[in-house]
Image: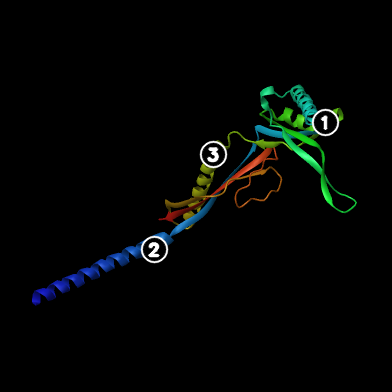
Amino acid sequence: MKTNQIIITLIAGLSIVVFGLILSGAYKYKFKSTNTINVTGNAKKDFESDLVKWTATYSRKSMQLSEASDLLTRDREVVRNFLIKQGIKADEIQFDAVSITKDFVYSSDENGRSYNQFSGYSLSQNVSVESKNLEKVDAASREISTLISQGLELSSNTPNYYYSKLEDLKLELISQASSNARQRADNIAKEAGSSLGDLVKADLGIFQITGQNDNEEYSYGGAFNTTSRSKTANITVKTSYLAD
């Protein structure tokens, strides 16, 4: 009987000690987790696009499919020769497959009954250029409308501008934003009479690319401007440091 009481007493005492250790550890963890410095680092860089993509569309319509096809083939050669004369290399020019549609006119007879009347074949084709010679492609995109005077039904889209070393730029800005965050946290710690401890958390923000001086707003999913040759890249890093 006495043995059982001794065992029970020992277990109870041990439980109190273990509970005290757990409580003490929880308090230390809570203190440690709340004694942090939270800062956001930022980095941005202006850069110039080094790749341009541009497309245009031309079309023909005829009651005879073969005639429309012949006209479109002639137009394709006119467009190709024009681009090459503008200084664009032949291997930078890409022609998509021809799109063919049957057109109908919706009418009604004297009795009010509606019917469809075939009005011809419409053929269209896209031409695209991808090049690192931005100046020549820009000039071609502006001047190609002069081909309309040669009978082409043509529309030119706005060029889109890209940067071929975007991944390298992202890594560079992430490094700069992280360094900026640590500098800010270190300044806060020094002003508070403390010292900066280990990094406990870091969250990368959304990569934003906007046109320079365009007053574009950042997007929740990340802005990616393609209409401006001159761009600005921006990234943020949210960090938490321990304060010793």
Q: Quadrant of residue 61?
A: top right
Say how many tags the image has.
3
Residue mark closest to the camera, 2 vs 1? 1
Say which amino acid is labelled 3. Answer: Glu
Q: Horizontal placement of 149 versus 209: left or right?
A: right
Tag 1's secondary structure? loop
Q: Residue furthest front?
A: 111
Relative to 69, say whether 204 is above or below: below
- Determine which residue is flagged by label 2: 30
Say which amino acid is labelled 2. Answer: Lys
- Determine which residue is flagged by label 1: 152
**Quadrant that contains the C terminus:** bottom left
Q: Viewer-proximal residue, 110 or 179?
A: 110
Q: Position of residue 12 (x, y in %)?
A: 20, 72
Q: Position of residue 3 (x, y in %)?
A: 9, 74
**Quadrant that contains the N terminus:** bottom left
